[in-house]
């Protein structure tokens, strides 16, 4: 919801933000449990901006956190495309940029493993130089 709320504020001030791109950084985290050395990524290869994971690549927590960021991006894009005309317009204008980041392990020892498997989302307006 906070991302939708930010888009709504931008939309309400669209004249002010007409010459801006929306940059959405999604940082994925994994818990610190070991993944067996022989583990491989077995799904289809993903080669997009910020993500380059090929089928049969070795699986580790860095890859897992990158996948978490990537698939959060896919989900967010799908949901915002369905629910926001303004998002659809900005996307059609190529003014939406996603930056998926695999941060690896979240090593906060005071937090349960489930809470360490997460994403952090940050949206920023970036002026377009004309």
Image (cartoon, helix red, strand yellow):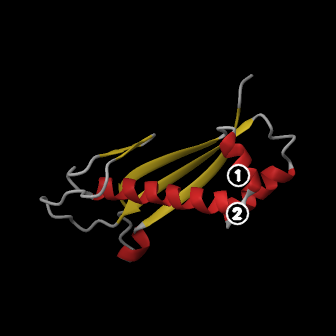
Between 110 and 116, the residue placed more toward the observer is 116
Q: Which residue is rendered at x = 84% and y = 45% of the image?
A: 14
Q: Which mark is residue 83?
A: 2
Which secondary structure, mark 1? helix
Residue 111 visible in rendering: no
Which corner quadrant of the image does residue 71 belong to?
bottom left
List the residue tagged with mark 1.
Answer: 87
Which residue sits furthest left?
38
Query: What x and y, as percent, mark residue 58?
Result: 20, 52
Q: Which residue is rendered at x = 43% and y = 73% of the image?
A: 115
Seen in the image, is 38 located left or right of residue 63? Answer: left
Which corner quadrant of the image does residue 19 belong to?
top right
Using a 10 Å C-alpha cutoff, classify the residue at mark 1 as few (fewer than 14 neighbours), some (14 to 19) or many (20 or more). many
Query: What x and y, as percent, mark residue 51?
Result: 39, 45
Query: What x and y, as percent, mark residue 116?
Result: 40, 69
**Distance of label 2 from label 1 (alpha carbons):** 8 Å
Q: Quadrant of the N terminus?
A: bottom right
Using a 10 Å C-alpha cutoff, classify the residue at mark 2 as few (fewer than 14 neighbours), some (14 to 19) or many (20 or more). few
- Up-down relation of residue 119 to residue 13 (above or below): below
Q: Which mark is residue 102?
A: none
Between 107 and 101, the residue placed more toward the observer is 101
Q: Which residue is rendered at x = 39% and y = 76% of the image?
A: 114
Q: Are discs 2 and 1 less than 8 Å apart at CB?
A: yes
Seen in the image, is 120 located left or right of residue 20? Answer: left
Which secondary structure, mark 2? helix
Q: Which residue is rendered at x = 68% and y = 42% of the image?
A: 92
Residue 86 visible in rendering: yes
Query: What x and y, as percent, mark residue 54?
Result: 28, 47
């Amino acid at each position: 919801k906070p991302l939708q709320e930010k888009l709504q504020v931008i939309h309400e001030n669209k004249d002010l933000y007409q010459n801006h791109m929306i940059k959405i950084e999604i940082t994925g985290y994994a818990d610190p449990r070991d993944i067996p050395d022989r583990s491989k990524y077995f799904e289809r290869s993903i080669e997009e901006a910020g993500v380059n994971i090929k089928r049969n690549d070795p699986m580790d927590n860095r890859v897992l956190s990158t996948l978490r960021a990537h698939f959060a991006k896919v989900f967010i894009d799908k949901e915002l495309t369905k629910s926001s005309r303004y998002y659809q317009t900005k996307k059609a204008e190529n003014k939406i940029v996603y930056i998926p980041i695999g941060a690896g392990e979240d090593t906060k020892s005071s937090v349960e493993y489930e809470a360490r498997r997460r994403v952090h989302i940050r949206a920023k307006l970036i002026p377009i130089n004309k």
